[in-house]
Image: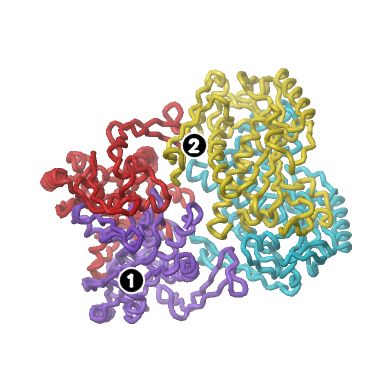
Chain colours: A red, B purple, C cyan, D yellow
C-alpha cells in the first residue's frame, strides 16, 4: 500500500498544470523494497498468500516482496483516483466519497454513514471515526503485532450526492462494477450493498424503500437498497461494506511446503502489517471514485446529465 | 427467470450438431408476457424496483413486465452457460458447479459444500439439499404468498475440480470477476468467498490455510480462502455465497409516488414470486460457469493448461 | 448482402416507437438460402474464397452458402447503421454520408465528392453517379456475367459536415477506425484517405493543406488530408476509397483441390454476382456511419460538443 | 520516432532475465526534446499537422514538440514489438517479418517480397533493399532537405511463415486488424493487401489464386490475396503496402492562421525529417508483429495451433 515517502512522477498527459485530454501516466518507484526480508519465500509458499498460486499459474514468480501480489500495487489506483476526484468534483458538484473502518476482528463501531466526515475518519490512526472503538482497535492491533498474529475486518464506504441514473441495466449494474473493483483489492473476500446479508433476513414489506417527494425530488424514506435499484443509482447515499481477511503474512511459524513439495515451518520476518484495514481505507475510496467516474462518462455519452 | 415453456432457438454458430467456432446466437421468445398485469407501473414506481431509476436514467421505460429489469433476461445467461458447460466438460474433465439455497429469511441449512450433489439439490423444489430445512422453507414461502409479502436469502455455490492457476493478479482476480458476474444478477446485493464476512472475526493464525502435500499435489488443510488466493485458483473447492434481497414486487399495498410526483398506494397484481431463490440457483451456476470458462480461455492463451 | 425481400424484426430496445436506451436487437431470417447450390463446396475449396481458411482454422465449416463468409452477414451492419443514422441526424445536424462506385475494373468515373448527392447515386443501378460511365459499367458487368467471370473496383465515400474533433490521437485515429471498419467487409483489400497512394507522389509543399479563415471557422484551402489530420477530423469533408477485389466465386471452371488434397476443376453454380460493388455501396456507408457515431459518443463523454 | 540515444528502462514484468507473465512496462525518457524549436506552434497551426485538430478537440495542446502527435510516441510500439517478437519466435518458429521502403515520391523499386532479407534492407540507409533505387532515393531526400521541402512514399511489409488460421471471420479480419494498426501510425493515409488497388483492374479469372498441393500442404499458385482469404491467413506470405504522406512540417514558409484566426506565414525550424519512410520501416514491422502475436494468442485460446 502507498507509503508517505512515495513520490509520484507524472510522465504524460499534463501540460502547464492542466490535463491535455490524453492519458495521464504516473510513476512511483518503490524506493523502500527490502528483498532480503523475503528470501524464504524464494522456495516456500506462505499459507493463504499468492506464492503458490502465482507459481502454479506462471511457473515463475518474483518472490522479492510478493511482486504484483504486494499491496504496493494499489498506489496506482490511489494516484489514478486523485485525478478522477478532480473530474468528479466538476462533474457532480458536492459529491462525497468517505470510507472508514467499521469493524476489526470482533470490535465493531456504530457509525452513521449519512453524516460521517472525512475529518472524523482521519482523526483516528486506524481510520475508525468512533473514538472509543478506535481506541480498542488500536489496542487489539498492538496485541496482534506482539503475538506475531494478524486480524481482518470490514471497511464501509458511503458515496453521497450521486444523481439518479448512473449504472447499466444488465451486466454493468452499479453493484457489479463497484463489486468487481473492490474485490480486486488484495485481501478482499466479500462485499455487500445497503442492507446486504442482513437484509436477507427481512421481508419485502420491511425491506422495500417507500418513495416520497422531498424538495421536488423523488426520494426514499429508508435506504435498505444502499442507493442502487435495478443496478442504477437512485440518488440516495450509495453504501457498501468490504470484508478483508486477516493479513496472510504473519511472524508466527506456520506449516507449509516448499517448491519441492517438502513440508517445513515458515515464519515471516520484516514489516508485515498485522492489520491492513486502516491503510486500505483510501484504496476502497479510490476504487469507488474510479467506478463512479467511469459510469459518469458512460452516462454522459449515452444520455445527458 | 427461465420457465419450463421457454423454447430456445439456435440462430447461428451450430452446423449439423457441432459448433462452428463462430458466435452462437440463441433466441427465446417471451411467449407468456402479460402486459396488462403491469398497467399500474406505467405511471407508478414500485418501491425498491427499477421503475424509478430507469425513468431517471433514460426518460422512458418499458413498464410492461419490467423490460430489462425483469429476471426474464437471465434466460440468456442460462442458455449461454449450457454451451459453456460443454466446453468446460472437455477443458477441465471432472469439473462440477453446484449451487443451492443455503438460507431463506432466517431459516438456514447446514450443508457440506464439499460433498453436496446436484441430485440432492434438485430433489427439493426450493433447491435446498437438506430435506428438513427445505420443508420449513417451503412452508415459509407459502405463508409469504398468502400474506402478499416476500423473502430473500442466500445461495451458496461450489465449483469443484478447478485446477490451480485460473484468475489474474490485479484487476481481474477470480473473486473480482465472479463477484461482478453474480452482482449483475437481479436482486443480488452481496457476495462473499470462503470464510467471507465471518472470516473477518478470525485471526491470521486461525484463518490461514496451511499447505501440505497430498497425492503429489500441493493442497491446503483448511479452505477458508474459498479456493482462491491472490486472485488465482489454488485447486481447492471454490466456494461463495450470494445475498438476494426479498422480492421487491409484493401484493400488499405500499406507499410510493407516481411519475407526476403524487403520493399513492400501490399493490401489485399477478404472478410475482414471493421468493426468487429457488429459481435463481441455476442462474448463479450459469454465471459461475461463464466466468470459469472465460478464465480458462485466457489462461489457455497466456500459459498452458 | 441485404436483399429487398429481407424482413427486419426488432427484438429488443424499442418501445412504442421510441428507443429505450438499452441494446436494440434486430433479426433478419435468411429466407432465400439455397444450400443445394453449394453442394460442391462441401468438399472442394473455391479459389480465393474462405472455404480453405475456415476449414484450416476451425476444422469444420458451414459450406451451405459460405456461412459467415457470405456477404449476407452485412445486413446486420446495415440494420445497425439505420439506427445510428438517426442518432447522428440529431447529434450532428446536416451530416451527410454518401458512397458511390468510382471505378469498376478499368472504367473510372470523375466525381466531385464535395457535391455528389445520394439521389445521383441512386439514379444508377450500379450506383455510379456519372451517367455515361454508369452505362459502360453496366455493359461490362453484363459481359462478365455472360463469360462466367467477375470484376472488382473502387467505392468512394464522403462524409460531409463532421465537426472538428472526432478521433483519438494514437491507436484509435479516425483513419484507423474507419480503416478497420471498411477492411472488415468481404472482398475489401485496401483503403486510402484523401490523396491516399497518389499523394505519396507529391511533395510536402504541394500536399499540405493551407489553413484560412472562412465564415469565422478555420478551414483548409485544399483537402489532400481527406478531412483528417493527426487522426482527428478537421471539419472538412472526410473522403476515402475502398478497393474491392473481383468476386471470388465464378462460374468458369477453376483448378483447385478438395478436402482430401486431390486436384479437381470447380465451376460454381447459382446466383453469384459478377460484381459486388453496387451492392457494397450501402455497406460502406453503414460502416462509416457506425464509426462516426461511436467516435461522437466517445467525444461527447470526454469533451463537449 | 525512436532515436539511437533512447534508453529503455523495464519497469515491471521481468525478473532475473525472464518474463513473469504479468504486464511488462517499458519507459523511455525523451532526453532530446527541444521545446524552443516549436515556439511558433504555440499560437500557429502547421498546415496538415495535428496542431489545429488537437486544439479543436481538447481546447489545449502541448505545442512543445507536438505532444502525442509526434512520431516519438512510436517508440512504445517498437519496444512492445521487441518483446512480441520473442513470443512469436517460440510460437511460430521460422516466422519472418520484413518491411522496406518500396517507393519514395515517384522513385519506385521492384522488390521480390518473397525473398527480400532484413540484411538487404538494413544495408541501405533509406531501407530500400535495391541498391540503385536506394541511391536515387538518398539523392532526392538530400534535395528536399536543401529545398526545405519533403516527400512521402510507400512501405511494403511481408510476413512469411504464418500458419493458416489466424484472423477472425467478421469484424476482426486479419486485414482489418493489420489495417487499423498501420493506419494508426503518424502520416499513414492508406493500406492495401496483396494485389490491392491494382487488383481491382483484374478479372476474377485472373485474380483468383488456384489451390494446389505442395509437400502435403494446401498452397496457392499465385498470391494476389496477399496471404489472407476471408479475413484469415492461408499460409502464404502476408503482403501489404502502407502509404505515407509527405512530412507535414517543412522549413519553407507556408500560409496558415493562428489561434486567434489571423492569417500568417509559418516556416518551421529545427530537425524536421524531409522523409519519414526510412525510420518508419521498423514501426510498420512492429505493428505487424503485435497484430500477429495478438491473433496467435486468440487462436491459441479458441482453437489449437
- What is the x, y in percent for residue D179? 65, 46
Residue B194: x and y in percent read 28, 61
Subunit that carries the residue with mark 2? A
A238 or B295: nearer the viewer? B295
Q: Secondary structure at mark 1?
A: loop
| Labels 2 & 1 near each other (Cβ < 8 A) | no
Q: Which residue is mark 1?
A: B249
Asked where in the image residue B154 lies, by quadrant, the reply is bottom left
Q: Residue at x 44, y 26 (%)?
A: A16
The answer to which of C99 and B91 lies nearer the viewer is: B91
Q: Is B305 rendered above or below residue C96?
A: below
Look at mark 2 in the image and give the residue it sits on: A22
Circle 2 or circle 1, nearest the eye: 2
Q: Residue at x 58, y 64 (%)?
A: B21
Q: Secondary structure at mark 2?
A: loop
Horizontal relation, residue B196 to residue D49: left or right: left
**Gap between marks 2 and 1 measured at Cα:** 46 Å
Image mark 1: chain: B
Q: Position of residue B211 (x, y in %)?
A: 28, 56
Disc tally is: 2
Quadrant location of the N terminus of chain B in the rendered image: bottom left
Q: Which mark is residue C192?
A: none
Picture coordinates of residue D112, whole percent (x, y)? 77, 40
Of C261 and D237, nearer the camera is C261
Q: Nearer the viewer, residue B93 or A287?
A: B93
- When the figure is inspected, residue C164 is found, relative to residue A248, above or below; the finding is above
Q: Work out whether C268 lies above or below C98.
A: below
Amino acid at each position: 500500500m502507498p507509503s508517505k515517502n512515495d513520490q509520484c512522477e507524472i510522465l504524460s498527459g499534463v501540460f502547464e498544470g492542466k490535463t491535455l485530454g490524453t492519458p495521464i501516466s504516473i510513476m512511483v518507484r518503490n524506493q523502500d523494497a527490502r528483498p532480503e526480508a523475503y528470501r524464504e519465500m524464494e522456495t516456500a509458499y506462505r499459507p493463504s498468500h499468492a506464492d503458490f498460486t502465482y507459481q502454479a499459474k506462471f511457473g515463475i514468480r518474483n518472490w522479492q516482496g510478493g511482486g504484483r501480489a504486494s499491496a504496493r500495487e494499489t498506489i496506482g489506483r490511489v494516484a489514478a483516483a486523485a485525478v478522477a476526484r478532480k473530474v468528479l468534483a466538476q462533474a457532480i458538484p458536492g459529491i462525497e466519497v468517505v470510507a472508514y473502518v467499521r469493524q476489526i476482528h470482533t470490535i465493531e463501531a456504530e457509525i452513521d454513514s449519512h453524516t460521517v466526515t472525512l475529518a472524523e475518519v482521519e482523526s483516528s490512526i486506524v481510520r475508525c471515526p468512533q473514538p472509543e472503538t478506535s481506541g480498542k482497535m488500536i489496542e487489539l492491533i498492538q496485541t496482534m503485532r506482539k503475538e506475531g498474529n494478524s486480524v481482518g475486518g470490514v471497511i464501509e464506504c458511503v458515496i453521497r450526492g450521486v444523481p439518479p441514473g448512473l449504472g447499466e441495466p444488465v451486466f454493468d449494474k452499479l453493484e457489479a462494477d463497484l463489486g468487481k473493483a473492490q474485490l480486486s483489492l488484495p485481501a478482499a473476500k466479500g462485499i455487500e450493498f445497503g442492507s446486504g446479508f442482513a437484509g436477507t433476513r427481512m421481508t419485502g414489506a420491511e425491506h422495500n424503500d417507500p418513495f416520497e417527494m422531498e424538495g421536488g425530488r423523488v426520494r426514499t424514506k429508508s435506504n435498505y437498497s444502499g442507493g442502487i435499484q435495478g443496478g442504477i443509482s437512485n440518488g440516495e447515499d450509495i453504501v457498501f461494506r468490504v470484508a478483508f481477511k486477516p493479513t496472510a503474512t504473519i511472524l508466527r511459524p506456520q506449516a507449509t511446503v516448499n517448491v519441492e513439495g517438502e513440508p517445513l515451518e515458515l515464519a515471516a520476518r520484516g514489516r508485515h502489517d498485522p492489520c491492513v484495514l486502516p491503510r486500505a481505507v483510501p484504496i476502497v475510496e479510490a476504487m469507488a471514485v474510479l467506478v463512479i467516474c467511469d459510469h459518469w462518462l458512460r452516462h454522459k455519452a449515452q444520455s445527458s446529465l
